[in-house]
Amino acid sequence: MAADWLGSIVSINCGESLGVYQGRVSAVDQVSQTISLTRPFHNGVKCLVPEVTFRAGDITELKILEIPGPGDSSSSSRQCGDLQQTEVGIPGVGCQVGPSQNGTGKVLKKPLSSSAPQNIPRRPELKHQDILISPQQQCSKSYMDRHMETLSQSKGFRRRHNSWSSSSRHPNQVTPKKSGLKNGQMKSKDDECFGDDIEEIPDTDFDFEGNLALFDKAAVFEEIETYERRSGTRSRGTPSEKPARYRHDENILESEPIVYRRIVVPQNANKEFCTDSGLVVPSVSYELHKKLLSVAEKHGLTLERRLEMTGVCASQMALSLLGGPNRLNPKNVHQRPTVALLCGPHVKGAQGISCGRHLSNHDVHVILFLPNFVKMLESITNELNLFSKTQGQQVSSVKDLPDTPVDLVINCLDCHENAFLRDQPWYKAVVDWANQNRAPVLSIDPPISEMEQGIDAKWSLALGLPLPLGERAGRLYLCDIGIPQKVFQEVGINYHSPFGCKFVIPLHST
């Protein structure tokens, strides 16, 4: 009857939704058509509940993995005999018996019968490792047993007792090992590789950390280095060898040593700067700088040429500060930058007007402030005539300057001479407007004395050689205005260009 199947180990397949359960039958109810398993496993993982119950309608397939023998009170496991058929008291559910000789099982599905189960011959007792196996393992177990048995006989290979080894079927079987000579020759390579007894291998895990600690790398490297020094050889990859690292703009070929001080002035410089490449650029006094420009003009570098060169370099720097190609793009018409250009009635103001003309040509909205004077310098008049041909806007009153912050303020109000201009009302009004505006300030050729600078600058642009500017000048940049090398030599300056491929370079305090 149904009570005869209590204690059997079965595998119940409930379809894709519920999965496969394995366990020992604890109860079979023919009235409610249910079956209960104790200590169940779900898809190979032990369940958290001690017992589960299944209805007959939820069971797709039922396989008997092991049947307890008569009088077996210890619930030790016995497997079904080969090619035997049985039935369990649940209608519509089949039972799969143990594997046959050819490695396949036989499944019988038949209605519920009240007859007692047939006597099924029992297989030899299995160990605890073989109690619960999946249906796929149950189907292929005979094949694996024969395969392992053949392998052990042919190659002298023996494994420990487990669910896949042949020792589970024949516990007392010992596989003979081939030894000695084979046909008068040395034993085969298979015997050399697989002939050792597996029992001799220790069960403890290999201590990787402990063995790694025994390796003294410093001593080994020192020994290698000592050997190389004695033998005169040089190995590849020695840790003491540090490969040289080069930048993308450096030459990997060996050349003469670099001389970083290539500009020497006739008098001791009050302040020195250096470029990104490390070249030293000394500062010069205002008198020496004025003499340098005078000698250059005598040789043909006129004021108009210097104004044009200064305007180009200053506009390039301003365009870069405004965002460069990310901001000044034909597709970004709505992001047109605005620059307020503050100029005085002197040569420094003419330099600013030249810079504003180039900025306006690059689609920058320029607002030029220049006070009204009865008589202007010829250089300012010429630059204003050119600026008037652009889209730039010229104002002479502080009230016409923007009330909102602009993108950049270019300061050309101060100069080395004409100190009386700083007392004029228009000068003070413009300085107050610039200090209240939140825009960053770029000063072009600022004076030396910090007291003469009414507007604090974030950047300052020096011409030719820098002056010893203070902290209020901000970060210093140097531009090339085209003075030849022999002109520097004529005023006593040993000069070698620090600009390289650029016309505007940053300077750093040493």
Image (spheres, rainbow, N blue to C red):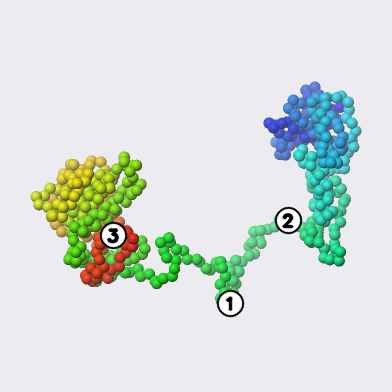
Q: Nearer the viewer, residue 112 or 383?
A: 383
In this rendering, position of residue 375 left or right of residue 76: left
Q: Residue 231 has which mark?
A: 1
Q: Amino acid at mark 3?
A: Leu
Q: How many marks?
A: 3
Q: Which residue is mark 3?
A: 478
* Earlier sequence position, callout 1 versus callout 3: 1
Helix, strand or loop for disc 3:
strand
As measured in the structure, the alpha-carbon distance from the residue carrying label 2 to the one carrying label 3 is 73 Å
Helix, strand or loop for disc 1:
helix
As measured in the structure, the alpha-carbon distance from the residue carrying label 2 to the one carrying label 1 is 44 Å
Q: Is residue 176 visible?
A: yes
Q: Relative to 442, say whether 283 is above or below.
A: below
The image quarter in which residue 212 lies: bottom right
Q: Amino acid at mark 1?
A: Ser
Q: Position of residue 63 (x, y in %)?
A: 79, 34
Find out whether the residues at labels 2 and 1 contact each other: C-beta distance under 8 Å.
Answer: no
Q: Residue at x 47, y 66 (%)?
A: 244
- Binning the other alpha carbons within 10 Å of mark 3 as few (below 14), some (14 to 19) or many (20 upward) gives many
Q: Relative to 94, say whether 132 is above or below.
A: below
* Earlier sequence position, callout 2 versus callout 1: 2
Looking at this rendering, what residue extends furthest in the bottom direction? 230
Q: Which residue is mark 2?
A: 204
